[in-house]
Image: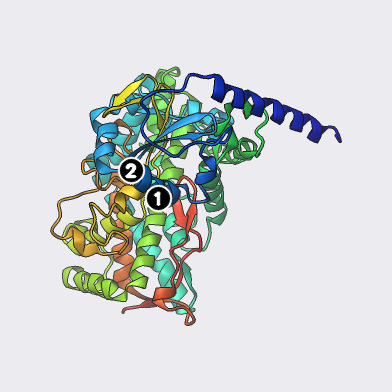
Amino acid sequence: MEFLPIIVGIFLSYTLIRATLSIFWSTKPTNLPPGPTPLPIIGNLHLLGDQPHQSLAKLAKIHGPIMSLKLGQVTTLVISSATAAKEVLQKQDLAFCTRHIPDVLHAQDFCDHATSFIPVGTQWRTLRKIFYSNLSSNKALDANQLLRSQKVKELVAYCRKASVSNDSVDIGHATFRTTLNVLSNAIISKDLTDPCEDSGKEFKELVGKIMIEAGKPNLVDCFPVLRKIDPQGIRRRMNGHFEKILGVFEELIQERLGMGCGLKKDDVLDVCLKINQDNPHELTRSHIKALFVDMLVAGTDTTSSTVEWAMTELLRNPHLMAKAKEELEKVIGIGNIAKEDDVLRLPYLSCIVKETLRLHPPIPLLLPRKTIDEVKLNEYTIPKGTQVLVNAWAIGRDSFIWEDSEVFKPERFLASSVDVRGQDFELIPFGGGRRICPGMPVALRMIPLMLASLLNNFNWNLDTKIQPNDLDLIERFGITIQKANPLYVVPVPLN
């Protein structure tokens, strides 16, 4: 075993020499977009820091909204303006719709089965249709309206219980649990966590580990020659996380199959199992489990973090929270739980959600894409195999588009038609084009519903030692942006 570090060192030296030679011997693409001068071997990796979305936004101010970098051996295109994003996500969507697959998502062959990563084609369309028909269509959303309402009532009940003993509530965890149970009931007709107890932390921690590993900078993605040794152990750890979560879904599938033909639930799992039985090549068991990971992991983490950011911003700005509460009192009455029909009559609340998504897009660099052929983008030539990052975080803070771009100001949307549904490229928290987030319609119902009910039933007290202005906005970078320090606040009932 004492020879292992020496062997690894020799292999690393060999692979880095190969990478260096390939940089100098390969034909350098011409007519690339501007960008910072790369260093030998590492390229521009040293410029990313621990908050890549912020670092890339700063670099774009120097080099422009269409920028190229060399991240190790990988040519990368960074899009940082609404105009350029529209070109990539809409006008030339087909040329840019293939996913760049990070090495970590090869764990358990996840990327070969997940809707978010498989190539656009017949199988992708089948999975998207299942997602849309059973979760995201207006018909499906209306059918599950009572379910969402019941789960929000359970969220309020949990907060009311905490208020009796003057306990603080972890907003991110509480809304994660609510969203998880909404989605799990639509998918498998059961709660995955106790809605009235402080449970589900193990599942949330597992999801958090998956999202962190998936978003962690990985040398293998920059130097593919290192793939065999996985020097940071990221794929190895993700193998363990995926094994656990896929195992949970395998048990649920076996449980359903054991019920027999007479006990159908008419949920997403039943739909998937029927397709699997009729045409096992179209939808395998692996596809079903990966689909559930897509639905549950991505949906819960992004939705709950958005509510947490919204509450944080409102607590930092008490006058805005007061304005939101005033609207709620007039429209639905103080102390009542919001219904989805009420949300349509709460324009200021809608502005708060949009402003939160502008400043805190759940996936700051969206999910990476790549070019499968050489592409012309404006006057530039983008080589085949280029990684493409769309910096939604930078676009949402573009001072040429947004006045006081760093300030949380919901009022900016009161007289604006800009929306978050992928047609207005100034605000694209869910992406756009063929690869737009399929869970967006569910999120846009859950976020305002939970936020309205939390605001209309409680006042929220910070720790006596913390002033509103002292409440931090420190980000923890992964695939999703989360608060580095969870928001704990004490609920005080309004009635």
Q: Is residue 335 visible?
A: no
Q: Residue at x 42, y 79 (%)?
A: 467
Horizontal and vertical percent position of residue 77? 39, 34
Disc 1: which residue: 58
Q: Nearer the viewer, residue 218 or 286?
A: 218
Horizontal and vertical percent position of residue 464? 47, 82
Disc 2: which residue: 80
Task: Indicate which disc, 2 or 1, sits on the residue closer to the N terminus.
Answer: 1
Horizontal and vertical percent position of residue 468? 39, 76
Type of the residue with mark 2? Ser
- Within-10-Å neighbours for mark 2: few <14, some 14–19, many 20+: many
Left or right of 232 on screen, residue 469: left
Location of the C terminus (image quadrant) = bottom left
Type of the residue with mark 1? Lys
State the image quarter where residue 291 is shown.
top left
Left or right of 30 on screen, residue 213: right
Q: Is residue 317 visible?
A: yes
- Identify the element where label 1 is drawn: helix
Left or right of 453 on screen, residue 204: right
- Identify the element where label 2 is drawn: loop
The reply to whether dot 2 and dot 1 touch (C-beta < 8 Å) is no
